Amino acid sequence: MHPEVKTFVRMKRFVLVILSLVVCLTSIGAVGKRSNSPIGFVENPMLWADVPDPDIIRVGDTFYLVSTTMHLMPGAPVMRSKDLKNWETVSYIFDRLTDSPKYDMLEGTVYGRGQWATSLKYHNGRFYALLAPNESGAMGDTYIFTAEKAEGKWTLLSRMRHFHDCSLFFDDDNRVYVIYGTGEMMELKPDLSDVIEGTHQQIFKREADETGLLEGSRMIKHNGKYYLLMISHVYAPGRHRREVCYRADNIHGPYEKNVILESEFGGFPYLAQGTIVDTQDGDWYGVMFQDRGGVGRVLTLMPCRWIDGWPMLGDEEGHVPSLMRALKSGEEEKHIICSDDFNADQLGLHWQWNHNPIDNAWSLTERPGFLRLKTNRVVPNLFLAPNTITQRMEGPKCSGAVLLDVSKMKDGDCAGLAAFNSDSGILTIKKNGKKWTLEMSEQSVKLSQKDKKVENVTEQIKETVTLTSPKIWLRVDGDFLPRRDIATFYYSLDGEQWVKIGTEHRMRFDWQRFFMGSKFAIFCYATKKKGGWVDVDQFSFSHP
């Protein structure tokens, strides 16, 4: 390397190190507050929230991202960005799934199932999204949706057999394929109505060192070659989760393999699963998710450098960088998690319901400026309560506060705010006769394996206080720094003086039950008789 080039590389690394130190010191000084990244830079994680199984494409100067939200409705969120730094939710691919009463929390649930690993494509002026719920039988059928604009409206185009963690792929000759499982492929009919029978192919065989799952297929074409990106779980001493790439000159093979990322990051485990995307200027980026415990699976942004025809991810050492230069400067600040005063005539796209909502049991118009949550089903616990409304929690630290008017609750009603997951920390206002009490509790749900039925809920009440006013503020703070995952709970009678209640709750990620990060959840349900309601005045989100 020429001496001047070496000097430039050293200076570049020095500048990035200094910027990283500035970011770290700023974050520490703010006691966990997520600092605004230096102007023109993206601080990793790009999205420090539960945004797993990403697929990302670019259309013109705009990037579109889809993710998995399983049992939350509407489902398959589409997010948009101009600079890979500021993201906003612009649509959902479907409003609800209706193949089974389990989606309504009747005869079981779909916790941890529902929509998985959507594949997003743009072809001949239209957007296409392919997804397959992680279910058996007809509930697991693959759906293909289409839209003229990613912002919607999306319409169902077809349904066909189940394809696990699949990638839709349009080739240059307009033939269409679905790549799924561990290197399986089928061709689709030109109108995408179904598969072409007899086209199944195993395009590569698992190697001896691939002792775990190979999944999360994402197929792209670059410079005439086919690239299939997949996550590899290697269960062996000294081996780690990694992203691998299979490359071929022909879509049918033969394929050769290379490891393109094997890196830990930020004090958390090794990361993988995602895809790569190019810019208008011909630069490439990788977007991969990382498991971060209680907050869920977060998204990281990294360079993608084409080396010897392989899309190698990470910096020069193959590591995920702390900082990435944003594509544009001066873009409007946008977020996928938002405060809300409920003054709009439609519910914001930052909200999702736990399972299918009951539309006549909530309203933004019966009391303008408030979200009314009405009871319409008697249930024994929060995990079966309809119309629980949620937003993601976010690292490194976050706070969600809600102002409630509980004056119209009926005897036996429960309402409040939770750090909601299969193990939840909950602030519950209970109506007992004519009196209200506030409880902080920890609750854990046991689900059946087949139908995800709620078999049992264990509850530990940590503290109870008596309320004298129907107007109350509740707050949940989350700390997702390494080895923390702690939620703490507060209430206020005036919105200014906050009183801590109960104990710290350890948030957990359990793939066998909910399979998602903790959510802020606002709820109201009946345990004795339906017909009561609460009015939600506002939800305030911040980074303390």
Image: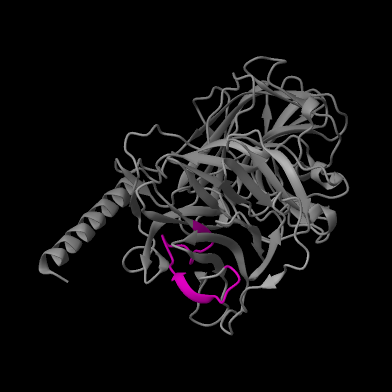
Q: Is residue 266 above or below residue 542?
A: below
233 or 79: nearer the eye?
79
What percent of the width, then of the height, locates residue 27? Answer: 35, 47
Residue at image point 75% right, 50% down: 193
Residue at image point 75% right, 39% down: 96
Quadrant in which residue 176 is drawn: bottom right
Disc tally is: 0
Q: Work out which quarter of the rendered image holds the N terminus and state it.
A: bottom left
Q: Work out which quarter of the rendered image holds the C terminus and state it.
A: top left
Q: Residue furthest front?
A: 173
What secondary structure do most residues of the magenta stretch adopt? loop
What percent of the width, then of the height, locates residue 98? Answer: 81, 42
Q: Is residue 259 magenta?
A: yes
What percent of the width, then of the height, locates residue 36? Answer: 35, 40
Q: Residue furthest left?
A: 3
Residue stretch rendered in magenta on the structure: 251-275
- In the rendered image, is residue 462 in sight? no
Going by the image, does 361 lie left or right of 120?
Answer: right
Residue at image point 67% right, 53% down: 116
Q: Is residue 127 magenta?
A: no
